Amino acid sequence: MRAVAGLLSGLIFGLGLVISGMSDPAKVLNFLDLAGHWDPSLAFVMGGATVTAFAGYRLAWRRPAPLLGARYDLPASTRIDRPLVAGSLLFGIGWGIGGFCPGPAWTALPLLDPGTLAFLPAMLLGLWLGTRIKRPLASRPKDTTG
């Protein structure tokens, strides 16, 4: 049941991306182009998503556990460290260059746009490489001499 709920949630999210036009990388790039043909519609989509998520989290956290799980899966760490900042920078740079983040890239795949067809394999390769690079780094002993 949890997998079905995840699939339905993903389909609703993807439908929202398509309806809002966020599966079009030109929309994102025009939002980032403050000196050119700036398109503020992405800000309204993000604002609507923020309000919806805020309300949804407030309702969900009133429950002792999620509907389809034994406990909430929350991050163990709240530290802002070098890997978090580096990953955020890479994500932002890639988003600014290509106009895609993972969700909209998948929703744009059926259009067979050359940019999408180049971005998705590169994204998957980057995810695969990231796990290969991060695994040995995580197993190294930490220097506690500080």
Image: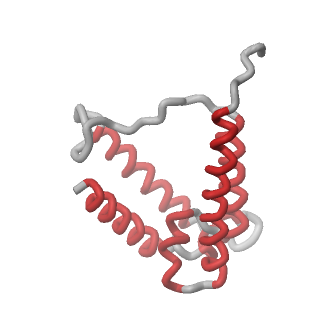
Say if 106 sits above or below 134 in the image.
Answer: below
> Residue drawn at (44%, 50%), measured in percent from left and top?
50
Q: Quarter of the image holding residue 27?
A: bottom right
Q: Nearer the viewer, residue 80 or 38?
A: 80
The image position of residue 138, as x and y in percent, is 64, 35
Q: Which residue is at a point 26% across and 42% down the rendered structure image?
A: 69
Quadrant that contains the N terminus: bottom left
60, 6: nearer the viewer: 6
Q: Is residue 100 above or below residue 50?
A: below
> Which quarter of the picture shows residue 121?
bottom right
Q: Position of residue 102 (x, y in %)?
A: 55, 63
Look at 25% across and 36% down and name the residue there. 65
On screen, residue 137 versus residue 56, left or right, reads right
Question: Foreground residue, 93 or 119?
Answer: 119
Where does residue 39 sit, x and y in percent of width and height? 61, 69
Location of the C terminus (image quadrant):
top right
Give 63 or 1, whichever is nearer the viewer. 1
Left or right of 92 on screen, residue 7: left
In the image, what residue occupies the spot 62% across and 58% down? Answer: 128
- Identify whether 93 is placed above or below 77: below
Residue 3 lies, in percent from the top left, at: 29, 58
In the image: residue 54, left or right of residue 141: left
